[in-house]
Image: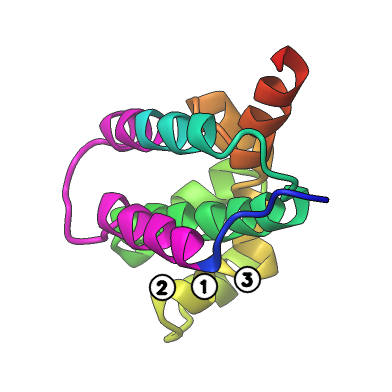
Amino acid sequence: MRIRVDPKAVERLKVKIRELTSRRWSVSMACRIGKLNMFIMGWMAYFRIADASRVFRGLDEWLRRRMRQIRWKEWKRYAARRRNLRGLGIPERSAREWVASSKGYWRIAGSPVLQRALPNDYWADLGLLGLRRIWRRFRATA
């Protein structure tokens, strides 16, 4: 017998994360990550006995894409986006190509260029806790 996370609970989690990662909510990234970490830690403490590694991995990917979307919007202008992409190691040609794109924030957040510029380690360095990593930590202590 296995314990799973109810799909309705996952949907409620996504709704709350959407509120905390709203592009309209203009707070610093450190504040946003702090609020996210607090919420995620509590949610994961409740669901720590669930066998849902795959679900948590998918939610982690989705959360990081939301965060990339916010970062892209923060950069706002062509020059800032190009400068930041170049600073993160993206070649000039690719940076210009993606900065000039008319695609929306969500679409750009899933692009290979932004995933390379803002990898998982980037978010870990900023302090963002992943659902799966917290789940593993809770499972190790249980």
Q: Residue at x 51, y 29 (%)?
A: 45
Residue 102, position in %: x, y?
Answer: 42, 86
Pick the front one: 118 or 129? 129
Q: Are marks 1 and 3 in contact (CB under 8 Å)?
A: yes
Q: Residue at x 60, y 43 (%)?
A: 88
Q: Residue reaching furthest top?
A: 141
Magenta range is 8-37
Q: Which residue is labeled 2 in the image?
A: 105
Q: Is residue 2 magenta?
A: no
Can the viewer see residue 90 in this picture? no
In the rendered image, the quadrant that contains the C terminus is: top right
Residue 7, position in %: x, y?
Answer: 54, 67
Residue 11, position in %: x, y?
Answer: 44, 66
C-alpha separation, residue under disc 2 versus residue under disc 3: 10 Å
Q: Would residue 54 be found to the left or right of residue 123 on screen?
A: right
Mark number displayed over residue 108? 1
Residue 41, position in %: x, y?
Answer: 46, 29
SS at badge 2: helix
Q: Earlier in the sequence, mark 2 or mark 3?
A: 2
Q: Would residue 90 be found to the left or right of residue 64 on screen?
A: right
Q: Would residue 102 be found to the left or right of residue 60 on screen?
A: left
C-alpha separation, residue under disc 1 versus residue under disc 3: 5 Å
Query: 39 above or below 118?
Result: above
Residue type marked 2: Tyr
Can the viewer see residue 122 in this picture? yes
Q: Are marks 2 and 1 in contact (CB under 8 Å)?
A: yes
Residue type marked 1: Ile
Pick the front one: 70 or 84? 70
Few, some or many residues within 10 Å of mark 1 (<14, 14–19, 20+): many
Q: Which residue is labeled 3 in the image?
A: 111
